[in-house]
Image (cartoon, grey):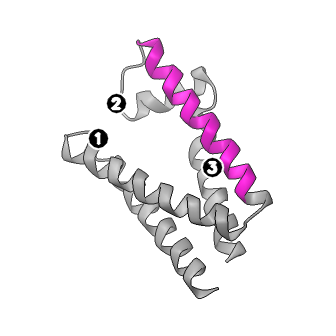
Amino acid sequence: MARWGRAGALYDLVASIAFVTPWTAAGMLTLFGTTTEDPMTLLFATLFGTVVVMWSVARWRRPEPLLIGIDTVGRGLFSLWFAWALWHGQTPVLALFLVLELFWGAAQLRALLRR
């Protein structure tokens, strides 16, 4: 179980590290076709990036069932919001993130249930 928890944490770290600063987040958002003229957009992107990176480090250091369980629920919610955004016409690139969230959520849930 710890192996899947750490692997999911590493994925989150790699996927989110570019959102930790306003400069790198602006570049990433531009890749997704989002305008970055609004400072609030960058604020929320960097808050998201910072929280996910910190959460990743916590799960990497302590891949405990409680933390992995909380993360698995969070992945379910992230998947719901990705699907909602896709449904409302956002960039199809989000489909890749949706698939990855579903994969990691299923892998972690399976590991939790097998322990």
Is residue 97 covered in magenta?
no
Q: Which mark is residue 33?
A: 2
Q: Quadrant of residue 54?
A: top right
Residue placed most toward the observer, 56 or 29 = 56
Q: Residue furthest right?
A: 61
Secondary structure of the residue carrying numbered label 1: loop
Q: Which residue is mark 1?
A: 91
Tell me how many marks there are.
Answer: 3
- Give the image location of residue 36, x and y in percent: 42, 18
- CA gap, disc 3 to disc 2? 20 Å
Q: Closer to the N terminus: mark 2 or mark 1?
A: 2
- Give the image location of residue 10, x and y in percent: 67, 57
Q: Is residue 87 left or right of residue 75?
A: left
* Stretch in magenta: 38-59
Is residue 58 covered in magenta?
yes
Bin the neighbour count of mark 2 within 10 Å (Cα to Cα): few under 14, some 14-19, many 20 and up. few
Three-letter code, disc 3: Val
Secondary structure of the residue carrying numbered label 3: helix
Q: Which residue is mark 3?
A: 14
- CA gap, disc 2 to disc 1? 7 Å
Q: Quadrant of residue 99?
A: bottom left
- Give the image location of residue 57, x and y in percent: 74, 50
Residue found at x 72% / y 67%: 64
